[in-house]
Image: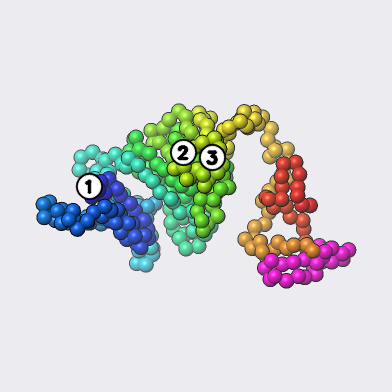
Amino acid sequence: RKRILLDHIYGVDIDPQAVEVTKLSLLLKVLEGENEESVGQQLSLFHERALPNLGQNIKCGNSLIGSDFYAGGQTSFLDAEEQRRINAFDWEKEFPEVFGEQGKGERGQGFDVVVGNPPYIRIQALKEWAPREVEFYKQRYHSASKGNYDIYVVFVEKGLSLLNSKGLLGFILPHKFFNAQYGEALRSILAGGKHLAKIVHFGDKQVFENATTYTCLMFLNKAGQESFVVEKVAKIDEWRAASFAATTEMSIVGEIQSSKLSDKEWNFPVGENSGLFEKLERIPIKLENVTDRIFQGIKTSADKIYIVEEIKRLPDKVYIYSHQTNKEYWLEPNLLHPLIKGGDSKRYRLLRT
């Protein structure tokens, strides 16, 4: 276990505390199943420490920003605190056994496998406390070139670049980039290289207990392949309990040709309705071609304040209940507008008007 850990497992995190917790977790794994006698044998026979030093394997740094961040003389604009926060990390220099020592022989090939759960942070939030990094991502990464992206798309591009020619990547991440405008650049990268190997799509099923996120498992192949598997999970608890073994009751599985992908929106039709979806995709006229009435309105991020429940309506006033204050009020009718949320609409009908 020590040999595997020291020769084959590497990790980077920008949070020093996360780095130390990871080291501790891995060391506990090394000791699993050991006893005082077996540990003593290692010390006496092999003159080895029972626990290895993981300082060269698990390191603290910014996975997305390397030493090229300072190429344009950026350090002259940064104070010591900001340099410490950015914490640029040079993968090739820090892991020469993986990438090859710089200036000595041929360059290394990269990792066989990259796995992770990248952070989900909208770029609008990141701009508030990391404006320099945001500008760097836009210049350095193709996936950051389209609109108000989420930082996880940059992690996918970076992870793919760290693989060797036969390497594999596995991330759990939001599937919003399949259809969002900001995902176009990343879709272009993955489709162009035919990198998709498998998608496990959880739809609106929740994976994390303390956060509402709409996620998928995405597996990539650096070498590319002609087709990939899509699995849409219907019953996540049963699917998880079965050790991710798919059955027809738990999920729908299908295979899609990589040539069908482009930078356009991804929908992955599988199952009995796949033929209908493919037929609709072939129709040249879309809804957006015949109407300009579909758009995103104002987002307040304060639904409890602005969404109220109507109790009674009179010609000149409306009696409402506020979830924010837990009180009832009379309001003028011209201040209120009807609202249909996602759960209020079903096929061919609305539950509320």
* Residue 279 horizontal/vertical position (percent): 64, 28
- Residue drawn at (28%, 56%), measured in percent from left and top? 27
State which region is magenta.
312-334
The residue labelled by disc 1 is 3
Q: Can residue 184 be seen in the rendering of this structure?
A: no
Mark nearer the viewer, 1 or 2? 2
Q: Is mark 2 on a helix, strand or loop?
A: loop
Residue 23 found in image quarter? bottom left
- Residue drawn at (48%, 45%), measured in percent from left and top? 240
Left or right: 100, with 285 as reference point: left
Distance between the Cα atoms at labels 3 and 1?
39 Å
Q: What element carries label 3?
A: loop
Residue 169 found in image quarter? top left
Query: Between residues 156 and 65, which one lies in front from this camera angle?
Result: 156
CB-based contact (under 8 Å), mark 1 and mark 2: no
* Residue 222 horizontal/vertical position (percent): 39, 36
Mark nearer the viewer, 3 or 1? 3
CB-based contact (under 8 Å), mark 3 and mark 2: no
- Colouring convention used in this rendered image of the protein: rainbow
The residue labelled by disc 3 is 250
* Residue 173 horizontal/vertical position (percent): 48, 48
Residue 245: mark in rendering: 2
Q: Is mark 1 on a helix, strand or loop?
A: helix
- Residue drawn at (77%, 70%), measured in percent from left and top? 329
Mark nearer the N terminus (3 vs 1): 1
Query: Between residues 104 and 295, which one lies in front from this camera angle?
Result: 295
What amino acid type should be assigned to the residue bearing mark 3? Met
What amino acid type should be assigned to the residue bearing mark 2? Ala
Q: Identify whether 85 is placed above or below 246.
A: below
Residue 221: mark in rendering: none
Q: Is residue 54 found inside the magenta-colored segment of the image?
A: no
Mark nearer the N terminus (3 vs 2): 2
